[in-house]
Structures are given as C-alpha cells and as structure tokens.
C-alpha cells in the first residue's frame, strides 16, 4: 500500500476515561499536526438486542454518532455515552475503569471513524491513561482491546482495526512528562509530586531525583463533595449540582444564582430559601472535602515535596485552598496550554493530561511525527 494512502487511513488517538467524561485527542497520520478532540458522556451499559431494536424503531432521526454509539462484541451489546443514558446507565464510578474502558474505546473509535469518514478497515495507534491503582491491568486491557479491534459491530456496520502501536500510562503521566521536559533541573534534583484531582479519583505520582517513588490513587474525586451535598438536599442529583457548584465557585462563592437555577420549588420565597440552604451545605461540603483531600495528600507524602504540581478537573475548584495549604511550593497543570482548535468543548485544563500524552506519544514514535 502506498505511504500516502496508508497515512490517510491511519488514526492516532490518546484517550482518558474520566469520571465526568471520556476525553480523546485524535488526528489522522497524514494530518498529525492538526489534531482535535472528542468528548463523550462517561456512561456505558450492556443492553439487549431487543431493547436496541425497539429504540431504533421509534426514532424519527438518527442522532450524531457521539450520541448514538453502541458496539457489539460476540453476543454482547453495549451502549456508550449519551446513548447509554437512555437505558438508565450510570457512570460506573465505583467500578474499575479498565472494565468499561474497552467498550468506551471501541465506541470512541467508531465515532471518530464516522466523523472522519474513514473506511471500515484502518490502522490505529492508541495511547491511554488509567488510574495508578489500575495500572497493573494494562496488559489485560491491551490483550482484550487487540482482540476486540479485529472485528466489532457498530451502528454503521462491522469495523476491522489493526492496532499498530499501543501505550498505556498512569493518570498524570502526561503532566509529569511535560513538567520533566520543561523543568529538567528541578526534576532531576528535587522531590516533585504530581497530583491529579479528578471527578472520580485523586492520584499522586512522585519523583525523587527523576526516579519514581510514590504511585498511589484513591476514590477521593470531587464526586465525594457532590454526594455529600446530594444527601443533605431534597431531590437534587450530582449532575445538576456539579454545574451549579462550578458556577458558584467561579463567583467566588458569593452568588446564589447558580443554586436558584436548580431549585425545585416553584414558589419564589421557597426557591430563595432552598438556594440559601444549598449554598450553606455546599460551603460545608467543600470545606470537608478540602480537609479530606489535603489530609490524604499529606499521608501519601509524609516527607514534604519540593514542589507539588496539581492538575485535573477538580484542581481549579479548590485552587485557592491548595495555595493556602501548600504555600508557594506548587504550580498548576505543568503550564500546559490547550489550543483553541483542540478545546472545542470548552473543557480547558481538563484536557491537559491527555493532550500532553498525545504529544508525547507522537514524539516517541518516529512514524507518528510529521513528515
């Protein structure tokens, strides 16, 4: 096959299975310098072929691929992303990520194939991120993925994908690599802690004189703060609370408007009272979460780090408190900048780790670099 044709049917992807969303950076090999992003809802659910058929019969229009993704392996059907929500799926926050990562990866590959109008047979180079406490599962994940890619069914038919390169790194690896490359003197002489604070997990990778020394993960994502608010509120759920609390924190925790928007009562006086109550419990839950997460970080690193590097979606929600707690010995997101062309969904630094991973993945494989 001519080189130009091979490059045009070769997909390069870096993917992160976040608790709030699945995030991917991708490009064709022929346009590797022009990547973009894909963001999908985190849900995945096994469904019956009858349920799938009944749903399809009732549809007047076909939603966009990212909202209608399902895959079939052997006799098992899995709905992924927004489509999975129609079958009352949940995000699986208390399950290992790698168990659903297979179906999320296949679905994301199909969505990208549809967006790029790729043929049904193509080549793939893939890099992904798993929590440190699931990193031991990387070989099992790769084995399952290689087998599945040889043939799987999708809404548009069967796909056959040849996995050319595969790389799996722990969450925070993209940030760590970027920091190591941009601060070589510090990284080689000091103790550097990389903390990834996400929706589901909190992870820490620590390097001392460039050598890995700490490699830990916990379930202390920001979801724990939201769950505490949910338990003390009436009829709220974590999805509605998340958008409200993000806006509230952006207002420096002064405005009640974000909670007024999600108040359930129809009477103005009751809505105002409900919003005030939500502000009160949100303030307490956030303070409790900060105490919990900083205590865990201190437990992970009983010997103080020379510098903490914080990244992940939760970081910006508690940044001011992290500065107060860790003083001047910290920085954020390893100074990763997300190009506007990539951040098409306005996720900002929530893409930092996977974007840095994509760049690293391309840099270590000469065949993935621009010609």
Image: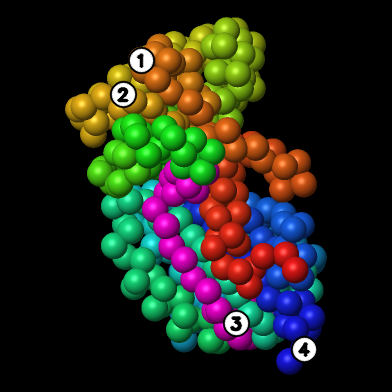
Query: Residue beneath label 2, please?
Result: 294
How far separated are the C-alphas under marks 4 and 1? 57 Å
How far separated are the C-alphas under marks 2 and 3? 44 Å
- Is disc 3 in contact with disc 4, using a CB cutoff of under 8 Å? no
Q: Say few, some or many: other residues with alpha carbon within 10 Å of mark 4 (under 14 / 14 to 19 / 20 or more).
A: few
First of labels 2, 4 by sequence position: 4
164 magenta-colored: yes
* Location of residue 259 with respect to 305 vertically, above or below: above
Q: Which one is in front in this view, the residue at disc 4 or the one at disc 1? A: 4
Q: What residue appears at the point 38 percent right and 26 percent down from the top-left corner?
A: 307
Q: Say few, some or many: other residues with alpha carbon within 10 Å of mark 1 (under 14 / 14 to 19 / 20 or more).
A: some
Mark 3, secondary structure of its residue: strand
On the image, the x and y values in percent for residue 5 come to 78, 83
How far separated are the C-alphas under marks 1 and 3? 48 Å
> Which image quarter holds the C terminus?
bottom right
**Residue 325: which numbered mark, if any?**
1
Q: Which one is in front in this view, the residue at disc 1 or the one at disc 2? A: 1
194 or 128: nearer the eye? 194
Q: Which one is in front in this view, the residue at disc 3 or the one at disc 4? A: 4
Query: Residue beneath label 4, please?
Result: 2
Q: Say few, some or many: other residues with alpha carbon within 10 Å of mark 3 (under 14 / 14 to 19 / 20 or more).
A: many
- Is disc 4 in contact with disc 1, using a CB cutoff of under 8 Å? no
Q: Across the whole image, how many numbered discs are drawn on residues?
A: 4
First of labels 4, 1 by sequence position: 4
On the image, the x and y values in percent for residue 192 come to 36, 34
Query: Can residue 21 be spotted in the picture?
Result: no
Mark 2, secondary structure of its residue: helix
């Amino acid at each position: 096959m001519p080189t130009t044709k091979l490059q045009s049917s070769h997909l390069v992807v870096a993917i992160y299975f976040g608790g709030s969303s699945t995030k991917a950076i991708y490009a064709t090999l022929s346009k590797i310098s022009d990547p973009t992003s894909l963001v999908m809802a985190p849900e995945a659910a096994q469904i019956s072929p009858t349920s799938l058929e009944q749903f399809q019969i009732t549809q007047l229009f076909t939603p966009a691929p990212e909202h209608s993704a399902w895959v079939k392996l052997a006799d098992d059907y899995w709905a992924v992303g927004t489509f999975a929500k129609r079958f009352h799926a949940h995000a699986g926050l208390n399950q290992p990520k790698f168990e659903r990562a297979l179906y999320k990866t296949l679905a994301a590959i199909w969505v990208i194939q549809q967006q790029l109008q790729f043929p049904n047979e193509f080549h793939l180079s893939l890099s992904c991120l798993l929590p440190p406490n699931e990193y031991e599962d990387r070989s099992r994940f790769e084995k399952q993925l290689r087998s599945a890619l040889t043939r799987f069914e999708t809404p548009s038919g069967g796909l056959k994908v040849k996995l050319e390169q595969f790389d799996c790194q722990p969450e925070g690896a993209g940030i760590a690599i970027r920091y190591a490359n941009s601060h070589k003197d510090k990284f080689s002489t000091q103790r550097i802690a990389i903390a990834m604070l996400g929706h589901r997990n909190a992870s820490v990778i620590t390097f001392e004189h460039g050598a890995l020394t700490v490699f830990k993960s916990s379930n202390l994502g920001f979801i724990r703060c939201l769950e505490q608010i949910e338990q003390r509120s009436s009829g709220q759920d974590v999805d509605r609370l998340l958008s409200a609390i993000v806006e509230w924190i952006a207002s420096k925790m002064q405005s009640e408007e974000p909670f007024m928007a999600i108040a359930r009562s129809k009477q103005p006086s009751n809505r105002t009272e409900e919003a005030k109550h939500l502000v009160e419990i949100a303030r307490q839950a956030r303070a409790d979460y900060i105490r919990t997460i900083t205590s865990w970080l201190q437990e992970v690193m009983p010997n103080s780090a020379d510098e903490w590097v914080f990244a992940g979606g939760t970081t910006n929600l508690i940044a001011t408190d992290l500065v107060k707690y860790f003083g001047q010995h910290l920085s954020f997101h390893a100074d990763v900048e997300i190009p506007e062309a990539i951040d098409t969904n306005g996720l900002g630094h929530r893409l930092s780790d996977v974007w840095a991973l994509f760049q690293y993945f391309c840099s270590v494989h000469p065949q993935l670099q621009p010609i």
